[in-house]
Image (cartoon, rainbow, N blue to C red):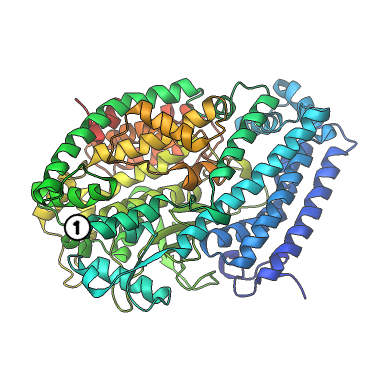
C-alpha cells in the first residue's frame, strides 16, 4: 500500500492526511526520506560543475524536503498526542537522525564546495538574503564540526548521537511522571475550592477514569489547587509531587541523564575549541557571552529578590494569623498570595475566570491580529491528529496566508507546557509555500457542556504562543532555513512576549472579556483592578524564573558538574534564594534545557527578549494608539516577516531606532526603584 506520508496530500490546504496516517507508516517513511536525502546530498557534493550558490546552497535548502515534511508531522504528533508506539519511534529516530546530521556536516566534498563559495562571496553577486544564508550555512557546518578530522570528528559524532538519545529519554521520563501521578480528592477535600477548580478536577478524573475528582500534574490544574485549597496537607503533597518530577527514582529518574548531558555538552564544546558549552552556545546569540547574560540577570535579581522578601513577610503574617507556626513554605506561597491579592486588590480569580473564556480569548487574539496586520481567520474542517484540535484558514485581502492549528486542552498524552511549532514552514524556493502553524497549550478541559475558563496567566500564555504563530505566519523569505522563528534564541521570544501586551489593552478586554453565563462585559472596576494588579507577586515570579536561568547558565559556563543537584543547591545558596520560593524548573524536569539543545544556556532569553518587548510596546504607547497602523506595518516589515534574513540586533534597531536598556523591563515588572 502507498505510504500516505510520501504521497501528495489532496487535503484542504495540503494538510497532513491524519485520518489516513498510521503509526506504522512513520518508520518506513523516515527510512525512505533519509535515503532520498542522502542521494540528494551526494549529488550536490559530487557535482562536477564548479560550486555556485544555486547548485550548492540552494540545492541544500531543498535536499531534505521530504524528510522535513515527514518529521514535521511525526514530531508534531509525538509531542502533543504521544503513545507507546510513538515514544518507541522517537527513541529509534534520535540516533538515526543524529547520525545523518553528522554525515552531512562531515562530508568533506560538500564542505569544500561551501568553503569555496565563502572565499569567493564578494564576487558572487549575491542578494542580501543569499549572502546571509551562505554565511549561516557555513557557520552551521563549522559549528557542527566540519573542520574536525580523525578521532576528534569521530568522537564528536558519537557525542551528538548520545545527546540526541538522552534528550528523547529525558522528555519521555518527564511525560511518564506527569502522566502517572494523580491525587484523588474526596468530597470533603473539595471544600473551599472555587467551582472552576472543582469542575477541572472532576473532568480530570473522568478523563483518567479515576472514578472521582483528582489533582494531576497539569499546570492548569495543580496551580489553581495550590492557590485555593485550604488543606495545607494536600497542598504539600501536591507540591512535593510537582517538584519531584524526574527524580522519583527508578526508570524515569532524570538526574543521571542530566549529569551525562552536561558532561557531553562540555566535551562537545572542547572538541570545537571553546572554553565552555555556554561560550559555544552563546556565540551566535544576541547576548554573545556568558558574562553579558549574567550581567542582565543580576541587574534584575537584586530588586526582584528584595520585592519577594518583602512579600514573604506579609504572607508569613497571614500564615501565622491562621494559627500555623513556623516559616512560610513553598506550598503556602500561592495560597496566601491569593488571599492577599483578594484583600489588597479586591480581585478574586474565581470571580474573574468566567470573564476569560477560552473561545473569547482566541477571538481576541485574532481580532488584534486583524487590526494590526489585516489578517482574517476562518474556521474550516480538515484532518486533525486529535478530536480537540481546531483549524483556521488565515487570509489577507482574500489571499491564503497560512493554516493555524489550535490544540488547547491538557491530556495525558501531551507533554506539559505550551509551545508553537510549524508542521510546514513558509518559503519561496520551492514555490509559494504557506505555513501550517500549531499552537499547543495545556488548559484544563471543562466538564461536558461547560465553557473552558482561563486564568489571566492562561490568557497571557495564549497570546504569547499566538505571537510565535504570527512570527511564522507573516514570514516572507525565500529560504526555509531562515523562515519564521529561525532566529537567534534570545530574539525568538520578542514577538511572543510583545504580543502579550495587546491582551492588556483595555479596549480589547472590554470587548472580549464577557461573562460565560450572562454575556455581560467585565465590570469596569474589575477590569481596572485586574490591570492594576498586573505586577502583583512579580517578585516571586521573577525570582523563580531567574533562579532557573542562572542555574542553566552556571551549569554550562563552567566545568560540567558531576552531581548537578549538588551544583544546583550551591548556585541557589550563593544567590540567597528565599526559602519559600523554588526554581520554576528544577534540573530533573527542566525540559527547556535537557530535552534538547534549544534553550540550553538560553533560558535567560525570555528576559533578554523582555527588555526589547517592553521597549517595543512603549513605541505604540508613545504613538497614543496600540494599533497605530504605521508602527504595525513597520513591526511586520522588520521583526515579523524577516525571519533570520537579517541580524537580530539590526532588525530591532530598524524597528525602534536603537537598542533598549533594562529600565523598561524593571518598570514593566513593577520592580523599578
x, y (%) of residue 398?
Answer: 46, 60
Question: For this rendering, which residue is in front, 425 or 281?
Answer: 281
State which quadrant residue 15 falls in: bottom right
Would residue 42 appear left or right of 161 to someone viewing this image?
Answer: right
x, y (%) of residue 643?
Answer: 53, 40
The residue sitting at the right extreme is: 48
Up/down of 400 relative to 43, above or below: below
Question: For this rendering, which residue is in front, 511 or 533?
Answer: 533
In which quadrant is the C terminus drawn?
top left
State which quadrant residue 204 falls in: bottom left
x, y (%) of residue 118?
Answer: 73, 25
Q: Alpha-carbon neighbours of circle 1 within 10 Å: few (<14), some, or many (≥20)?
A: many
Would residue 144 appear left or right of 382 to someone viewing this image?
Answer: right
Q: Is residue 120 visible?
A: no
Image label count: 1
Label 1 secondary element: helix
x, y (%) of residue 587?
Answer: 47, 42
In which quadrant is the N terminus drawn?
bottom right
Q: Which residue is mark 1?
A: 349
Residue at 44% over, 62% down: 406
Residue at 19% over, 57% down: 349
Up/down of 597 relative to 426, above or below: above
Question: For this rendering, which residue is in front, 386 or 124?
Answer: 386
Up/down of 57 relative to 170, above or below: above
Residue at 23% over, 49% down: 332
Q: Is residue 212 visible?
A: yes
The residue sitting at the front extreme is: 325
Residue at 24% over, 53% down: 508
Question: For this rendering, which residue is in front, 173 or 427?
Answer: 173
Amino acid at each position: 500500500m502507498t505510504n500516505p506520508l510520501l504521497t501528495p496530500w489532496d487535503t484542504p490546504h495540503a494538510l497532513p492526511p491524519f485520518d489516513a496516517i498510521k503509526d506504522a507508516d512513520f518508520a518506513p517513511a523516515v527510512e525512505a526520506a533519509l535515503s532520498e536525502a542522502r542521494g540528494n546530498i551526494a549529488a550536490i557534493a559530487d557535482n562536477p560543475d564548479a560550486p555556485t550558490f544555486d547548485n550548492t546552497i540552494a540545492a541544500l535548502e531543498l535536499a531534505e524536503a521530504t524528510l522535513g515534511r515527514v518529521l514535521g508531522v511525526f514530531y508534531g504528533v509525538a509531542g502533543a498526542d504521544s503513545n507507546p508506539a510513538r515514544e518507541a519511534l522517537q527513541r529509534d529516530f534520535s540516533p538515526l537522525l543524529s547520525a545523518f546530521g553528522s554525515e552531512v556536516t562531515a562530508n568533506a566534498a560538500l564542505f569544500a564546495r561551501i568553503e569555496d563559495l565563502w572565499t569567493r562571496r564578494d564576487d558572487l553577486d549575491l542578494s542580501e538574503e543569499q549572502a546571509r544564508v551562505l554565511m549561516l550555512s557555513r557557520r552551521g557546518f563549522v559549528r557542527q564540526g566540519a573542520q574536525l578530522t580523525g578521532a576528534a570528528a569521530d568522537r564528536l559524532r558519537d557525542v551528538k548521537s548520545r545527546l540526541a538519545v538522552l534528550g528523547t529519554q529525558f522528555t519521555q521520563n518527564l511525560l511518564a511522571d506527569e502522566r502517572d501521578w494523580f491525587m484523588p480528592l474526596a468530597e470533603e477535600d473539595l471544600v473551599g475550592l472555587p467551582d472552576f477548580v472543582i469542575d477541572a478536577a472532576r473532568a480530570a478524573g473522568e478523563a483518567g477514569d479515576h472514578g472521582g475528582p483528582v489533582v494531576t500534574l497539569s499546570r492548569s490544574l495543580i496551580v489553581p489547587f495550590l492557590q485555593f485549597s485550604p488543606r495545607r496537607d494536600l497542598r504539600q503533597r501536591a507540591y512535593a509531587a510537582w517538584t519531584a518530577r524526574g527524580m522519583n527514582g527508578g526508570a524515569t529518574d532524570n538526574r543521571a541523564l542530566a549529569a551525562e548531558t552536561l558532561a557531553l555538552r562540555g566535551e562537545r564544546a572542547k572538541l570545537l575549541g571553546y572554553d565552555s558549552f555556554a561560550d559555544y552556545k552563546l556565540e551566535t546569540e544576541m547576548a554573545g557571552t556568558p558574562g553579558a547574560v549574567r550581567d542582565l540577570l543580576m541587574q534584575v535579581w537584586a530588586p526582584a529578590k528584595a520585592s519577594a522578601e518583602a512579600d514573604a513577610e506579609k504572607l508569613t503574617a497571614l500564615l501565622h494569623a491562621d494559627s500555623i507556626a513556623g516559616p512560610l513554605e513553598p506550598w503556602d506561597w500561592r495560597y496566601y498570595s491569593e488571599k492577599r491579592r483578594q484583600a489588597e486588590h479586591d480581585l478574586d480569580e474565581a470571580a474573574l475566570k468566567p470573564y476569560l473564556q477560552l473561545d473569547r480569548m482566541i477571538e481576541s487574539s485574532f481580532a488584534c491580529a486583524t487590526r494590526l496586520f489585516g489578517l482574517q481567520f476562518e474556521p474550516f474542517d480538515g484532518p486533525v491528529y486529535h478530536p480537540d484540535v481546531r483549524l483556521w484558514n488565515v487570509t489577507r485581502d482574500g489571499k491564503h496566508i497560512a493554516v493555524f492549528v489550535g490544540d488547547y486542552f491538557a491530556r495525558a498524552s501531551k507533554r506539559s507546557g505550551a509551545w508553537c511549532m510549524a508542521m510546514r514552514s513558509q518559503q519561496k524556493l520551492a514555490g509559494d509555500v504557506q505555513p501550517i502553524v500549531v499552537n499547543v497549550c495545556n488548559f484544563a478541559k471543562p466538564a461536558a457542556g461547560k465553557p473552558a475558563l482561563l486564568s489571566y496567566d492562561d490568557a497571557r500564555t495564549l497570546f504569547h504562543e499566538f505571537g510565535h504563530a504570527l512570527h511564522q505566519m507573516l514570514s516572507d523569505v525565500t529560504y526555509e532555513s531562515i523562515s519564521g522563528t529561525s532566529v537567534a534564541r534570545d530574539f525568538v521570544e520578542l514577538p511572543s512576549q510583545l504580543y502579550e501586551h495587546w491582551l492588556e489593552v483595555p479596549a480589547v478586554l472590554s470587548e472580549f472579556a464577557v461573562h460565560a453565563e450572562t454575556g455581560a462585559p467585565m465590570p469596569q472596576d474589575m477590569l481596572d483592578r485586574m490591570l492594576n494588579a498586573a505586577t502583583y507577586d512579580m517578585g516571586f515570579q521573577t525570582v523563580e524564573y531567574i533562579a532557573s536561568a542562572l542555574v542553566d547558565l552556571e551549569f554550562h559556563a563552567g566545568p560540567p558538574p558531576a552531581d548537578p543537584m549538588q551544583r544546583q543547591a550551591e548556585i541557589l545558596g550563593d544567590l540567597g534564594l528565599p526559602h519559600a520560593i523554588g526554581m520554576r524548573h528544577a534540573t530533573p524536569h527542566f525540559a527547556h534545557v535537557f530535552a534538547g539543545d534549544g534553550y540550553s544556556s538560553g533560558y535567560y532569553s525570555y528576559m533578554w527578549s523582555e527588555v526589547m518587548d517592553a521597549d517595543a510596546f512603549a513605541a505604540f504607547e508613545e504613538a497614543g494608539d496600540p494599533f497605530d497602523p504605521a508602527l504595525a506595518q513597520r513591526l511586520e516589515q522588520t521583526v515579523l516577516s524577516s525571519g533570520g534574513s537579517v541580524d537580530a540586533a539590526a532588525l530591532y534597531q530598524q524597528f525602534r531606532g536603537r537598542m533598549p536598556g533594562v529600565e523598561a523591563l524593571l518598570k514593566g515588572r513593577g520592580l523599578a526603584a
